[in-house]
Image: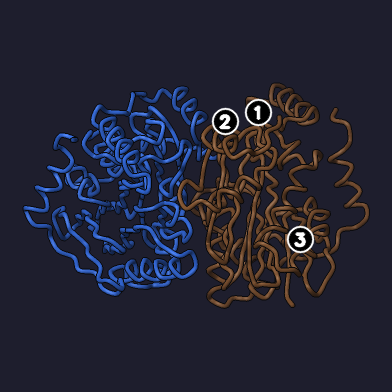
Chain colours: A brown, B blue
């Protein structure tokens, strides 16, 4: 029996470890993945996803999310949505609609109200402090870029019935303009899955990821029988180089993928942590580090110090 | 010298005929395409684009649009936006932003205000009458589908400097839910361009088009040296069949494409009119009709009667 789950960033660890066993049973496709993303959304110390996510330039938390079932190609997506407790649940629900399955902003909120979804103020005290600190920094040095923090949680799951599903959830770019939508709810860019082939999700600078439809491109490469273990890094390198040549620069881009056999692959142009578990191995955190020209990726288990630093950075008081 | 412009639906004709000569000169990439789409947006009798577009289920006109420069891969896009006179101008403007280049709903409207864009009430008397008539129909027969009318204007242009650009603009699905976004502003689904290869735009049921990232897929096929004259129909047929198999049905889908040499291709699973002009031929309206299993496409010039019927259907009183 094959099953697997992979997620972006160290933050996916507990959620995947808690839910991966569901993939052994015959449940609704995507149920384990949705539950895992809900757990990441609910954890207040992850500052780029769900509750505790960092706000836009007007200090409002706006959320993007998507879900795709690779067996039916059904998709649900939301962009620029406020006060929804679990964006991934709304996206999953929308994937059951034949029409109107990508909803944004006030329209998405109205739909969520009508469907009985839970609302809550997603702005935490800590996120407010981050916002204030950033404002102060920008006032003291207006040459600083206001934008950072775009660590989308994205997951791909393969269950024992051969269903590949993908999901994403994020509060997007810190200090973004109101109404800004990144790659996370954009089909083919932030996510794509086809159970006959594979699934992929992306994290990084959405404005660059969607210039290359990178999740769809990874799945197309798997369709052409490229090896998931190497092709994801090749896709990232090729696009990184192309964007620098054509556009002048390329922001951070990281992608995780599963093929239909539960083998996984990773590609990144920056240091990138990810989490994977499958029928062969217990859920594990890894750290991927590309070399300078992106031709090689070194994957290691992070040191206890790295893990402690990660945890401390998320919890220490904001000065 | 090579140049070409192709657009979806008969409605693109006057706009392409008026602007195609600009492509011979060295102007800003996309200038002719943006101006052509503006002309379609401004024409009040086209009921699925810009002024005169049909409203959502709350009788509000909500607009989607996008622009992509295939030489830089710069993209601007808007979704679910109200009261913007020319959505394509706003999308084009956003393509010059490095961050926040896909904006939706109130956030996009705020940005447009700040940037001095023209606002107007996009709901015409005639669109209101269509809405009222549809409401009456749905009351008399609740089994009818409320959804129709999704004739996005999409164009691809190749200028004499070898810049391929694409643009889309639509009021989306008639009677859609507030906040619904279709494929038109979704990168890779409604549009994609790479000046080294080709460009494509789609029209039809967005909820199905974005399940297959069809514009990006067409451009990828051109990258693999498939012939634009035949590959677009092959892409549509293959996806149509796949979606029926996996999802149970497939809505209308039509795609037009140009390759980097200005050759064009079309694919559709329904009767579809389009407009093309290039260095070899004057701007012309064509009608594409697939056979039942979508393996063959018959392309003809529409009869005078077809053209007169098209015009009358858009202008006759609504009873």
Q: Residue B234 falls in which quadrant of the image?
A: bottom left
Dot 2: within a 10 Å radius of its alpha carbon, few (fewer than 14), some, or many (20 or more) residues? many
- For the residues marked 2 and 1, what is the alpha-carbon distance in whole angstroms? 8 Å
Residue A90 location in percent, x, y? 62, 45
A181 vs B158, nearest the viewer: A181
- For the residues marked 2 and 3, what is the alpha-carbon distance in whole angstroms? 33 Å
Residue B5 location in percent, x, y? 25, 52
Q: Residue B122 falls in which quadrant of the image?
A: top left
Residue A11 location in percent, x, y? 79, 50
- The mark nearer the N terminus, 3 or 1, is 1
Residue depicted at x 89% and y 35%? A316
Q: Compared to A236, does A125 lie above or below?
A: above
> Which quarter of the image is occupied by the N terminus of chain B?
bottom left
Question: Does residue B275 appear left or right of residue A220 in this picture?
Answer: left
Residue bearing mark 3: A288
Please tell me how many numbered marks the rendered image carries.
3
Dot 2: what SS?
A: loop
Marks 2/1 in contact by CB < 8 Å: the verdict is yes
Residue A318 location in percent, x, y? 84, 30
Q: Mark 2, chain letter?
A: A
> Which quarter of the image is occupied by the C terminus of chain B?
top left
B212 vs A237, nearest the viewer: B212
Dot 3: what SS?
A: strand
In the rendered structure, find residue A60 and report the number of the disc placed on it. 1
Q: Which residue lies furthest to the front in this view?
A: B140
- The mark nearer the N terminus, 2 or 1, is 1
In the rendered structure, find residue A178 and report the number of the disc placed on it. 2
């Amino acid at each position: 029996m094959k099953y697997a789950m992979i997620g972006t960033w160290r933050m996916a660890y507990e959620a995947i470890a808690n839910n991966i066993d569901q993939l052994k049973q015959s449940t609704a496709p995507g149920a384990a993945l949705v539950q895992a993303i809900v757990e990441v959304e609910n954890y207040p110390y992850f500052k780029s996803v769900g509750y505790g996510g960092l706000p836009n330039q007007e200090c409002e938390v706006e959320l993007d999310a998507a879900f795709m079932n690779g067996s039916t190609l059904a998709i649900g997506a939301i962009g620029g949505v406020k006060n929804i407790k679990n964006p991934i649940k709304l996206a999953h629900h929308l994937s059951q609609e034949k029409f109107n399955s990508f909803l944004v902003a006030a329209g998405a909120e109205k739909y969520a109200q009508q469907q009985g979804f839970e609302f809550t103020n997603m702005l935490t005290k800590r996120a407010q402090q981050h916002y204030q600190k950033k404002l102060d920094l920008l006032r003291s040095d207006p040459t600083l870029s206001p934008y950072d923090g775009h660590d989308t949680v994205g997951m791909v799951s393969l269950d024992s019935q051969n269903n590949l599903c993908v999901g994403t959830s994020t509060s997007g770019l810190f200090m973004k303009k109101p109404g800004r939508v990144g790659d996370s709810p954009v089909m083919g860019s932030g996510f794509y899955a086809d159970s006959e082939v594979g699934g992929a999700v992306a994290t990084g600078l959405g404005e660059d990821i969607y210039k290359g439809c990178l999740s769809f491109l990874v799945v197309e490469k798997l369709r052409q029988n490229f090896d998931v273990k190497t092709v994801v890094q090749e896709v990232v390198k090729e696009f990184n180089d192309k964007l620098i040549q054509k556009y002048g620069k390329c922001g951070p881009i990281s992608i995780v993928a599963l093929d239909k056999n539960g083998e996984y692959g990773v590609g990144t142009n920056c240091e990138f942590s990810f989490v994977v578990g499958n029928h062969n191995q217990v859920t594990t955190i890894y750290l991927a580090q590309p070399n300078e020209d992106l031709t090689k990726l070194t994957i290691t288990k992070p040191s206890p110090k790295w893990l402690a630093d990660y945890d401390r950075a998320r919890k220490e008081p904001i000065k």
